[in-house]
Structures are given as C-alpha cells and as structure tokens.
Image (cartoon, rainbow, N blue to C red):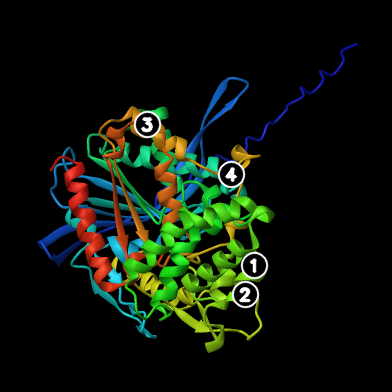
Amino acid sequence: MNQPKPTPLVVQTVSPPPTVQLTDSLVTTEHVIGTAEGELRYTARTGRIVLREDDETEGVFGGRSDRAQLGVTAYTLADADVTTRPITFCFNGGPGSASIWLHMGLVGPRIVDIGEVDDPATPPYRLKDNAHTLLRATDLVVIDAMSTGYSRVAEGHKPKDWHGWKADVELFTEFIRLWCTRFDRWMSPKFILGESYGTIRGVSVAQKLQDDHGMYLNGIILLSSVLDFGSQDFENPRWDAASLHFLPSYAAIAWYHGKHPDQTLEQVRAEAEQFADGPYRLALAKGRRLDPDQRSEVAGTLARLTGLPRRYVELTGLRIEHERFCAELLRDQGLVVGRIDGRYTGPAASGTEEAMNTDPSGDATLGAFTAALHHYLRAELGSTEEMPYWVSADLWRDWNYAEFQGRPVSVADRLERLMRANPALQVRIEYGYYDLATPYFAAQDMVDHLRLADEAFERISHAYFETGHMPYLHGPSRIREADEQCDWIRASAGQ
C-alpha cells in the first residue's frame, strides 16, 4: 500500500533589517574676511561628525557601529599647505558647556557684539567681523562636547555613558584622530585651546593622543586653567587651600568696585598674594592654636583686603566661600557680583540671601551669544539643523570622576608626562584677575608644584588680564589675547 509522502518542513528565517548607519552632516561654504593682517579666503564647515566603534563579541569582529555625533564648526585657509599650516582644536568646558563662547567670542571670523560691562548689548543683537580672528595664524576646529550644542549619542546609546572624565576624553581623542586622518592633518603643527574644564580635557586628550596614537602636539593653550580641583575645593571641610587661593581674586574684585580707592590694582594684588602666602596661610594652619590677638589681626587684614565687614569675616572663621563673597561684597547696595566675571553686577533677589542665586555675568552675556550663534550657523554657514542647540546643561552635577575616587581631581601629572615626553611642547596659561570660577592664584600654585626640570618651565608662558573667566568679554583684552595667541602659535610652530 502506497503511503503519501510527508510534506517537507520548510523553515523560513527572517533576517533583521540592515542597520542604517548615520552619515556626517557637514555643510561647506566659502568666505572672505578682512583682518588686521589683510584679507583671508577660507572654507567653513559646520554640522556633525559621526564617531564609530569596533563591534567585537567573543573575539569575533562584527564591523563598526555608530556611537555618537559631535557638533563641529571648522575653518580652513584656502590653498594652504597642510604640512606647515597650524590647526587648533578648540572647546569650552563646564562640564556641560557648548563651545559657543570661544567660537563666537574670540577665535572665529565672525563674533557677537556684546558691548562692554558698563554698556552691555541688548536685543536685538548683532554680529561683527573679527579682524583679530585666530584664523590669521591657524586653521580652527571648534567642537561641542556630548549633550551640548548639536552633539548627541547614536540610537541605542545612553548620553550619560559619555558624561564623565574618561569617556569624554576618549570621545574628543577619537574625534581629533579622525579629523586629522580624514583631512590629512597628521603633518600639520597641532594645538589645543581649552577653556575652564576644557583645560582638564585639553591636557588629558593631549596625553591620550600622544600615548595611544603617537600624535604629538606643538602646544596647548590653557585659558582659565583648573588642572587640580584640590587647589580650589570648597567641598573640603577645612577650605584652607581654597580660602588662600581665592583671596587675591577677592581683593582684585573689591578694588574694581571701589573698595581700595587709594591703591592700584597691582598694589592690592601684591599685598593679597603676600598675605596669603604668609600670615594667612599660617593662621589657617594653626586653627584653634592661633593666638586671639593674631586672629584679630588676620581678620582685620582680611576684611580690608576683601572689602567685607570685619564681623562677617570673623563669623566665617577666616574662611570666605566664593559664592557668599559674591552676595556679601555689595549687599549694602542691593547688588551681587559675578562669579564668572567679578566686574559684572546685578540686583540681589533679597537683602538676606546667604549666597548668590544667579550670576550677573552670565545674565549679561547669554542672550547675545545664543542669538548670534543660531543666526550665524543657519544664515551665514548654511546649517540645516533644527534640533535645540544646548548652550549649557548641568552635567557637572553628576559628572563621573570614578578614576579619581578617594582623591581630588587632578591632571597635573598628565601635563608633566606630556612635557617630559615631548621636549617641543609649548604651554600658554591665561588668567583673569576677576575670575572666581578658576582663580588665578590657584592655577599659579599648580604650576609651582609641577615636577619638571627647569628647562620645561621655560616652555610655560603666562598671560594675565584685567577681566574675568573669559578675557574676551572685554574689547581691548580680546584683541590683545587674540594677537598674542596668534604670535605664540606661530612661534610654537616654528614660523
């Protein structure tokens, strides 16, 4: 008897749809600008660059997948020889700040007109040509950190995975490596310009580029430097180091607001620095062992230098926290002074606030920078981005410093490593006297404790400005800063 043949079992497999990789979104435009050194023809590129990583499971390579898109605006001089033309990678800090400030305040060919501290710009704001752009001496690549500007993670990734010292350094290192490869800049003289937390990032990225990829830089500009948090940490219960290092800035700001009418700024600073390095340092070190008469004398000198009431200084235990200083200095006038730039003032929320609840220097500048950047990127550089441009985010609140657990965050050792391994590396450090975000005396102290040979210190140059955290918020200082940076870049590139 014939049996019917069974129907063969057919197993159908459905392949997952192919992964669609992100693509770069750079828009390219050509421009001409007149500068203090003549006319420049340059190419601008703005948009986002995709960064990828190798996929590997159990030792099997599975290709490369998207991990992030970093926002960038770059300027290159037309027809320049890339083997001799310098290139500078620029970024701000935060953590959580876009690089709008350096871009639209100092380095770019077009900048925002913010007015001056006693005559700030008001809406509607306007742009102006930057006759002192750094493009005179170097090509520029302005990069926004993850979750700032237009920088975003790729699908399937968590933004917080990039919100930390190590991951942030890896991201910027990979970006610079990729940019130099794609645009043939390995033979170019290379520089990093970092501001604020961007100085920690800058030194860390330079060290990783050097050690992981063999990419050696010609120079690093540290603007408003903070390489060692321990030198200005008010989280430490004793506050001793921070109290010492902030004092000269307190005195300078007090001078600016008329608390030392019969002295020059140089005289006030010199006295404050000498006092901090001598009697004040000893007084804080002694604690309760300090003789009552000496305590009274120190309190009197502190009150005079800082412009604060003597009784207030005594109540602080001789240790003055910076945001409380901002609220206290002009309390009798109903004003608070700026933390980013102590020249700025604004109305206090009340007459009894213990500490500042806003920063007048930020209030006076944020609107102008933001409006100018949005108009500039779209109307002049042809950007098609419509997502929000995040000028700032509070990433600093939860920034991951796991690698520094149990000790203050410091990358001073990485600067030492850089300078020992690369005897051609030049470092320029810029300070603002009225800066309470990264006080100049703390940054000086970091340099004074570097473990380097005398020769290396000869490669560290210093520049001081009668401004705050961002010297370019003052017109004459911006011009001087830009011109000096151009000269320094040329000299460091051997030109």
* Circles 2, 1 touching at the beta carbon (< 8 Å): yes
Q: Earlier in the sequence, mark 3 or mark 2?
A: 3
Q: Earlier in the sequence, mark 1 or mark 3?
A: 3
Q: As drawn, which residue projects farthest toward the bottom? A: 333
Label 4 CA crowd tier, 10 Å (few <14, some 14–19, many 20+): some
Given this view, does label 4 or label 3 mark the residue nearer the observer?
4
SS under mark 2 = helix
Q: Which mark is residue 210?
A: 3
**Image quadrant assignment for residue 474:** bottom left
SS under mark 3 = helix
- The answer to whether 466 appears left or right of 31 in the picture is right
SS under mark 4 = loop
Tell me which residue sits at (42%, 28%) in the image.
212
Label 3 CA crowd tier, 10 Å (few <14, some 14–19, many 20+): some
Given this view, does label 4 or label 1 mark the residue nearer the observer?
1
Q: Label 4 vs label 2: CA separation?
A: 29 Å
The residue tagged 4 is 408
Task: Report x, y in % for residue 208.
Answer: 43, 34
Q: Amino acid at mark 2?
A: Tyr
* Residue 402 visible in rendering: yes
Tell me which residue sits at (38%, 68%) in the image.
268
Q: Amino acid at mark 4?
A: Pro
**Image quadrant assignment for residue 33:** bottom left
Q: Label 2 vs label 1: CA separation?
A: 6 Å
Tell me which residue sits at (87%, 15%) in the image.
3
Q: Earlier in the sequence, mark 4 or mark 3?
A: 3
Q: Label 4 vs label 1: CA separation?
A: 24 Å
Q: Amino acid at mark 3?
A: Gln
Q: As drawn, which residue projects farthest toward the right? A: 1
Who is closer to the viewer here, 174 or 454? 454
Q: Label 4 vs label 3: CA separation?
A: 24 Å
Q: As drawn, which residue projects farthest toward the top? A: 1
